Image: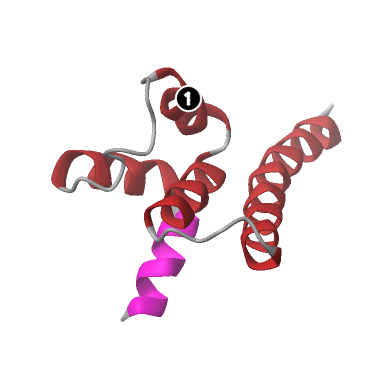
Amino acid sequence: MPCLLVVLVLLFPRIAIVVLYLFTNFFGGVYDTVLLPLLGFLFLPVTLLAYTWLVKAQYSVDVFFLIVMIVALAIDLGSLGGGYRRHRSRA
């Protein structure tokens, strides 16, 4: 069941952010303003979820923290790059 939940979050990160924001206090106490989560929702949703999870779990900035953030950023940038490549191949 947890693996299925992780797969669904990776497939639909923006829906997961909305559900977590509306029904839990997952983002409470992590961000001071609304601007950073809003930008994360628009541009880097997996990175936003990973950073929030790491801060809420009180992980220190070490190798594990950096690896999780790099993988999340690669997933976000990979999804952006794939859309660009598909658009370019049609022209």
Q: Which residue is nearer to you in this view: 35 or 44?
A: 35
Residue found at the far bottom of this picture: 1
Q: Please state the horizontal and vertical placement of residue 54, each as a whole percent of the image.
A: 48, 56
Would residue 40 appear left or right of 61 to someone viewing this image? Answer: left
Relative to residue 68, is residue 83 depicted above or below?
Answer: above
Q: Which residue is nearer to you in this view: 89 or 54?
A: 54
Which residue is the site of mark 1? 36
Q: Residue at x 71, y 42 (%)?
A: 77
Identify the coloring.
secondary structure
Task: Answer few, some or many: residues within 10 Å of disc 1's Cα (few below 14, many 20 plus, some between 14 and 19).
Answer: few
Relative to residue 55, is residue 38 depicted above or below?
Answer: above
Q: Is residue 4 magenta?
A: yes
Would residue 61 appear left or right of 18 to someone viewing this image? Answer: right
Which of the 4 image quarters holds residue 2? Answer: bottom left
Q: Residue at x 26, y 47 (%)?
A: 20
Q: Is residue 84 magenta?
A: no
Q: Residue at x 24, y 39 (%)?
A: 21
Element type at mark 1: helix
The stretch of residues the image draws in magenta is 2-11
